[in-house]
Image (cartoon, grey):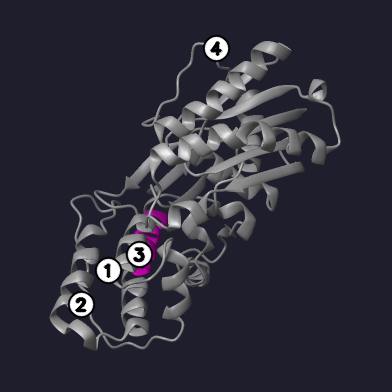
């Protein structure tokens, strides 16, 4: 089964052709990062306009790279949400048009489920499964007791971890996106600054707003005397400690066979190291860390989960709309 998947939830125009949920025939991504870097963040109106310019070009390249004809496609999958409403709308209109014209099924997908199921490109997923989702818009612990059944155990009360990275990078004078820059200079940092441990109302929830404010206050108190490498180290260790400790707690509360990392922040080199700490809680735990190309937004991950969703009877009518606040299936 060949699925043409389209992903336009934020600032990447992406189309992929995925066969049977595992084989990548093509995975084309047109990034807008250079455009938005000048503004220090994604400008929604600009993003949606660039999607309009790129969507047909990226679609054609995906079909050509896969060395197939569009008639060979068995279904069209699309990110319905969450994301930026204008960006989502461009991809959805494209997918609905293709579904209608070629009389093929339309499969609407939740963006985060794509990040979770991207791990099946490198490992067979086993259930019960715990997913740690870390991205610019989400920080969640998601339990899958069985295939394609999602339960959110904990989420952020304020900023997502990727958003916190970007905001801290901005006050430190680092370029956008901030995550890779903090990760890079933190490698040269030393244990020099102390940042507070944030408390949450629910044991498995996250909070990064207070940590971000503490960094800002520290900079204001010390002015030009801040050692950026040491501050990046302090922030990253504090943020990742929050992530790892909550994950350990979830593992102690729920019996799972498999743990997967998911989302853009899964590309963080220090987080990828720290995930191995989970073996201390459960030595026989199967751990999957996605390859770097799977971490950032792409359409291959949408095609991967769409194959599973299709088996579970997920279909979309031509009257569905983009939903920036879409809940899990």
Across and down, in percent, residue 285 comes to 55, 60
Residue at the (24%, 50%) spot, across then down: 158
Q: Is residue 9 magenta?
A: no
The one of 273 and 126 positioned closer to us in this rendering: 273
Q: Earlier in the sequence, mark 4 or mark 3?
A: 3
Q: Are marks 1 and 3 in contact (CB under 8 Å)?
A: no
Instruction: Tell me the magenta residue range.
Output: 240-251
Q: Which is in the foreground here, disc 1 or disc 3?
A: 1
Q: Which is in the foreground here, disc 4 or disc 2?
A: 2
Residue at image mark 3: 245
Mark 2: secondary structure:
helix
* Alpha carbons under labels 3 and 2: distance apart: 27 Å
Residue at image mark 1: 171
Q: Are marks 1 and 2 in contact (CB under 8 Å)?
A: yes
Q: Residue 173, located in which quarter of the rendered image?
A: bottom left
Across and down, in percent, residue 135 comes to 43, 52
The one of 273 and 266 positioned closer to us in this rendering: 266
Residue at the (48%, 52%) spot, across then down: 35
Residue at image mark 4: 317
Across and down, in percent, residue 175 comes to 41, 67
Q: Is residue 106 left or right of residue 180?
A: right
Residue 219: numbered disc: 2
Mark 4: secondary structure:
loop
Mark 1: secondary structure:
helix
* Alpha carbons under labels 4 and 1: distance apart: 45 Å
Q: Residues within 10 Å of mark 1 (few under 14, many from 20)?
A: few
Q: Are marks 3 and 2 in contact (CB under 8 Å)?
A: no
């Amino acid at each position: 089964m060949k699925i043409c998947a389209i992903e336009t939830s934020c600032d990447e125009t992406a189309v992929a052709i995925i066969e049977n949920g595992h084989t990548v025939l093509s995975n084309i991504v047109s990034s807008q990062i250079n455009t938005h870097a000048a503004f220090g963040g994604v400008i929604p109106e600009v993003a949606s306009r660039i999607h309009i310019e790129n969507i047909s070009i990226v679609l054609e390249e995906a079909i050509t790279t896969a060395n197939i004809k569009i008639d060979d496609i068995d279904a069209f999958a699309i990110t319905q949400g969450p994301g930026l409403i204008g960006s989502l709308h461009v991809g959805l209109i494209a997918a609905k048009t293709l579904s209608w014209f070629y009389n093929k099924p339309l499969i609407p997908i939740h963006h985060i489920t794509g990040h979770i199921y991207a791990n099946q490109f490198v490992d067979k997923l086993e259930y019960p499964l715990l997913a740690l989702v870390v991205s610019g818009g989400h920080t969640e612990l998601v339990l899958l007791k069985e295939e394609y059944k999602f339960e959110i155990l904990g989420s952020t009360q304020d900023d997502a971890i990727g958003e916190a990275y970007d905001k801290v990078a901005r006050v430190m004078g680092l370029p956008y996106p901030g995550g890779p820059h903090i990760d890079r200079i933190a490698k040269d940092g030393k244990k020099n600054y102390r940042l507070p441990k944030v408390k949450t109302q629910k044991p498995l929830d996250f909070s990064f707003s207070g940590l971000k404010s503490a960094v800002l206050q520290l900079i204001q108190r010390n002015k030009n005397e801040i050692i950026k490498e040491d501050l990046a180290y302090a922030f990253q260790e504090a943020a990742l400690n929050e992530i790892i400790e909550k994950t350990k707690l979830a593992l102690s509360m729920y019996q799972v066979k498999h743990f997967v990392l998911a989302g853009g922040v899964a590309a963080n080199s220090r987080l990828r190291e720290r995930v191995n700490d989970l073996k201390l809680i459960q030595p026989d735990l199967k751990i999957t860390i996605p390859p770097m190309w799977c971490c950032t937004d792409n359409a291959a991950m949408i095609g991967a989960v769409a194959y599973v969703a299709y088996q579970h009877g997920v279909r979309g009518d031509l009257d569905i709309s983009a939903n920036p606040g879409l809940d899990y299936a």
